[in-house]
Amino acid sequence: MAVDFIHVEGITRINTFIRSGEIEYKAVNKGPEISETAQNKLLEKLQTLTEEDMLFVSGSLPKGIKDEVFIDIAKLSQQKGFQLIWDISSESLINCLPYHPFLIKPNDEELAHLLGVPALKTDKELIGGARELMDRGAGKVLVSLGEKGALYVDENESLFTTAPIGKVVNTACAGDTMLAVFVGKLIQGENLEEALICATAAGSSTAFSAGLTDLSDLQKLKEQIKLRRVVM
């Protein structure tokens, strides 16, 4: 697989996750500070993307980069026509929606926070929250619901999946796995329902694995998942 990194001074941040019984601790180290030169190089590289490309922007920003970079990327997506997928917890996501991202993936707590409400608990509240973000410009919304499964909303569909049963030993990257598998399955030509079920199973497989999952339990987990379509 080809890579094209922007190289910066400093070492890669290493995070450690420690689980003691039912409690998970995260030791998050500081990464390098990103220079303005490196930031400009990244934006220049993104300007080469075209309508045939898809860009995922996820995680938190490293030191030295301000939230305004999200707006710059959103504008580039609209100008160049590439599909943009957001998986960030920054409040700046709201300001990126007018540039019509292809997909956003908050979890249920992040969705409530973006809307300025304490929580979204019912089907109606969750779907209504997702549709409010679509009204502001988001094309599609995928919401990870943890042990409750997932929600997908677009202009035509509102789909819920349940989560399979298992022991959670690792919460890191479960949402990332869900998003990657969901989009990957759609690119491979799978229908929406199958993509959402596979994505939910893959996210759960990560959560049930102490390290990186090999997805060997994917089919078994898929068989436990139920899909529900909600008409509102």
Image (tube, rainbow, N blue to C red):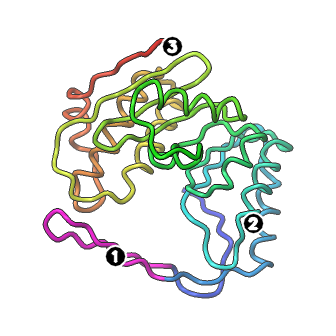
Frontmost of labels 1 and 2 is 1
Along the line of sight, the residue nearer the viewer: 16 or 229: 229
Segment tinted magenta in the rendering: 13-29
Residue 228 percent across, percent down from the top left: 36, 18
Q: Is residue 101 above or below residue 20?
A: above
Q: Residues within 10 Å of mark 1 (few under 14, many from 20)?
A: few
Work out whether mark 1 precedes mark 2 in sequence or the reverse, and give the earlier one: 1
Residue 134 percent across, percent down from the top left: 65, 31
Residue 89 percent across, percent down from the top left: 55, 56
* Amino acid marked by disc 1: Thr
Instruction: Report whether 134 appears left or right of 142.
Output: right
* Amino acid marked by disc 3: Met
Q: Residues within 10 Å of mark 2 (few under 14, many from 20)?
A: some
Which corner quadrant holds the N terminus? Answer: bottom right
Measure how far apart labels 2 and 3 are at the Cα level. Answer: 42 Å
Report which residue position mark 2 lands on. 42
Report which residue position mark 3 lands on. 232
Tag 2's secondary structure?
helix
Along the line of sight, the residue nearer the viewer: 8 or 98: 98
- At x 81% / y 50%, what residue is drawn? 76
Q: Is residue 171 magenta?
A: no
Work out whether mark 2 precedes mark 3 in sequence or the reverse, and give the earlier one: 2
Measure how far apart labels 1 and 2 are at the Cα level. Answer: 28 Å
Residue 108: quadrant of the picture: top left
Residue 78: quadrant of the picture: top right
Measure how far apart labels 1 and 3 are at the Cα level. Answer: 43 Å
Q: Residues within 10 Å of mark 3 (few under 14, many from 20)?
A: few
Work out whether mark 1 precedes mark 3 in sequence or the reverse, and give the earlier one: 1
